């Protein structure tokens, strides 16, 4: 495989994590358009830690995730008071607020004979932890996918545990969920916090494989991608989000690259088609059940 | 066990419930009846914590639960069903019960993180018991939304039971059921009472209410117009007027 292909592997990995960050929140029935904002926080914080403080990527990434999680937790509380379209609007506003914060954020220091750090509208260049430490493109791709695999496995396990059912119960019917003893505040804010943490991780990886970020990377398009993956893939399980990220990034964005802007049209059309004909996604519980019946594979277990 | 004192709920100028008093003793099945719009569901929703009362108090086991939100009243031991069924439709029958059992499990283990763990063997066995009790064992992997109407009603009662409540609020559990299903429900309610669960039954189906309850309170326009045994209530002139007369309409009795 050439570097271009490895680059694509990296992109798909980061976008999978991005989709999973929205997946957790969507399980509770909340649509968050703030994911790009959380990604931006993770990207800038982790980038500053490796570049300015010269930390290793792993603690930087986790700190970036935690910073995004703290913000997400704070956003989660007002999100309890608004729902549906109003929540979409409120989270878009938050995402824009974060983006414009970085647009105005300037903090550079001299490191040797160059000046490094975020430079407002010019962006944050030279996030060179990977090349400086001799990581090849393949190493970076492997690292991204190890992180993605850990998050996938954790969420897959959570889905099967009672915690997953609690999140889903809230997404299905809030009043019924309360009546079986679920504390909506705790569940919704936890989902937002977890979603923020995962998005922050995605941001840290994003900043380091591109080596250059600017506020425009974290616009409404990225927020749309974040929710598009779980919506297209369905909320039946985490694999839907994974397949949707691969499908969109590889087929729609790369293989059809020659089509240019028509791809954006197709992306939009795809979302509309799926929401109309398969409202619970391409891999919804109903569809998975049908597939199981046809193939006779993977009998549902009780635990 | 449950004491409601001068409970009122006003929606704008409408007095949905007005100065309502009643007491449900431990171990009885208490009926709450009345014509449509008489305030029965509003009362249930206030007890369950969905609405905050405009005025009045609700005590459960001597504890003031007037302002408690729904998840707190459940933890106190009050579980409920809804007039228009509210199941987790895209979860299986088994999962509906498993998630509802969460709070009982936390209480039993004293571990608030019980919800984060997979089900213990004992928890799973308890779910099987509710499935058997509600005659839904053969439907355990079915999505709740795909069940027949009567099965959904049974599942909703089972889900309330999964929280191991001391007190059960049933909001029209027999609505839309045929006579045979009503009879089965009657038997189940008696079994539950014998197990020590106190029941507040809001119901329009008189065959059930008059058969199964120990005492009944009758509401009309948000006020209590009668209270007593089924036989006493049936003889009460005010009750007969409320149901038959005054052109109030909507009588299901």
Image: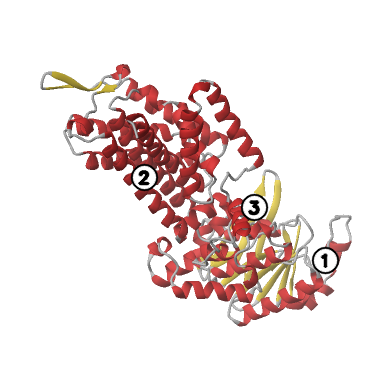
Q: Is A94 rendered above or below residue A70?
A: above
Circles 3 and 1, Cβ within 8 Å, touching? The answer is no
User: Could you tell me residue B54's position as x and y percent?
Assistant: 60, 51
- Disc 1 on helix, strand or loop? helix
Circle 1 sits on which residue? Answer: B238
Q: Give me the chain letter of mark 2.
A: A
Residue most extreme to the top:
A122
Q: Give me the chain letter of mark 3.
A: B
Residue most extreme to the left:
A112
**Mark toward the viewer: 3 or 1:** 3
On the picture, is A191 further left or further right than B25?
A: left
- Measure the alpha-carbon separation of dots 3 and 2: 52 Å
Circle 3 sits on which residue? Answer: B9
Q: Do the dots labelled 3 and 2 sit on one chain?
A: no
Residue most extreme to the front:
A1
- Measure the alpha-carbon separation of dots 2 and 1: 69 Å
Circles 2 and 1, Cβ within 8 Å, touching? The answer is no
- Disc 2 on helix, strand or loop? helix
Residue drawn where x is 69% and y is 59% of the image: B83
Label 1 packing within 10 angstroms: few (<14), some (14-19), many (20+):
some
- Measure the alpha-carbon separation of dots 3 and 1: 23 Å
Residue drawn where x is 56% and y is 74% of the image: B128
Front-lying residue, B221 or B137: B137
Quarter-of-image position of residue A139? top left
Where does the N terminus of chain B fall, quadrant-wise?
bottom right
Tell me if residue A292 can be seen. yes
Q: Is A29 rendered above or below residue B147?
A: above
The answer to which of marks 3 and 1 sits earlier in the sequence is 3
On the picture, is B149 further left or further right than B97?
A: right
Mark seen at residue A148:
2
Front-lying residue, A301 or A40: A301
């Amino acid at each position: 495989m050439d570097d271009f292909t490895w680059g694509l592997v990296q992109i798909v990995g980061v976008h999978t994590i991005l989709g999973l960050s929205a997946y957790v929140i969507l399980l509770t029935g909340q649509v968050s358009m703030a994911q790009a904002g959380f990604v931006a926080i993770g990207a800038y914080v982790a980038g500053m830690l490796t570049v300015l403080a010269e930390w290793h990527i792993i603690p930087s990434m986790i700190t970036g995730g935690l910073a995004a999680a703290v913000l997400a937790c704070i956003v989660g509380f007002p999100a309890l008071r608004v729902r549906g379209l109003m929540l979409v609007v409120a989270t878009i506003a938050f995402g824009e607020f974060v983006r414009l914060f970085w647009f105005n954020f300037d903090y550079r220091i001299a490191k040797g004979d160059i000046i490094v750090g975020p430079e407002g509208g010019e962006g944050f260049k030279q996030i060179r932890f990977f090349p400086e430490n001799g990581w090849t493109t393949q190493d970076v791709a492997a690292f991204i996918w190890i992180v993605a695999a850990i998050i996938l496995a954790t969420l897959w396990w959570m889905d099967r545990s009672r915690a997953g059912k609690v999140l889903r119960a809230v997404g299905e019917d809030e009043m019924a969920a309360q009546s079986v003893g679920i504390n909506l505040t705790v569940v919704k804010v936890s989902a937002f916090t977890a979603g923020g943490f995962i998005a922050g991780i995605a941001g840290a990886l994003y900043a380091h494989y591109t080596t250059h970020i600017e506020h425009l990377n974290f616009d409404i398009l990225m927020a749309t991608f974040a929710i598009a993956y779980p919506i297209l893939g369905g909320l039946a399980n985490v694999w839907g989000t994974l397949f949707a990220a691969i499908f969109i990034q590889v087929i729609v964005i790369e293989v059809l690259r020659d089509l240019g802007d028509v791809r954006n049209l197709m992306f939009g059309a795809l979302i509309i088609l799926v929401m109309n004909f398969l409202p619970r996604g391409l891999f919804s519980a109903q569809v998975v059940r049908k597939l199981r019946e046809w193939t006779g594979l993977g009998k549902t277990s009780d635990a | 066990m449950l004491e409601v004192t001068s409970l009122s709920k006003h929606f704008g100028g409408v007095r949905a419930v007005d100065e309502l008093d009643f007491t449900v003793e431990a171990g009885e099945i208490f009926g709450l009846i009345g014509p449509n719009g008489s305030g029965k569901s509003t009362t249930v929703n206030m007890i369950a914590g969905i609405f905050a009362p405009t005025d009045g108090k609700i005590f459960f086991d001597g504890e003031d639960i007037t302002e408690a939100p729904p998840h707190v009243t459940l933890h106190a031991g009050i579980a409920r069903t809804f007039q228009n069924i509210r199941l987790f439709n895209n979860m299986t029958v088994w999962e509906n019960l498993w998630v509802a059992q969460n709070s009982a499990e936390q209480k039993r283990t004293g571990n608030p993180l019980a919800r984060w763990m997979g089900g213990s063997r004992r928890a799973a066995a308890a779910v099987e018991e509710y499935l058997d009790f509600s005659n839904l064992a053969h439907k355990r992997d079915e999505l709740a939304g795909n069940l027949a109407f009567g099965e959904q009603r049974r599942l909703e009662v089972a889900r309330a039971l999964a929280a191991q409540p001391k007190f059960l609020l049933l909001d029209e559990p027999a609505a839309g059921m045929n006579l045979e299903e009503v009879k089965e429900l009657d038997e189940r309610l008696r079994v539950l009472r014998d197990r020590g669960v106190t029941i507040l039954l809001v119901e329009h189906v008189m065959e059930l209410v008059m058969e199964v309850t120990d005492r009944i309170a009758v509401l009309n326009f948000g006020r209590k117009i009668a209270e007593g045994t089924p036989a006493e209530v049936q003889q009460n002139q005010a009750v007969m007027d409320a149901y038959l007369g005054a052109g109030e309409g909507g009588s299901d009795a």
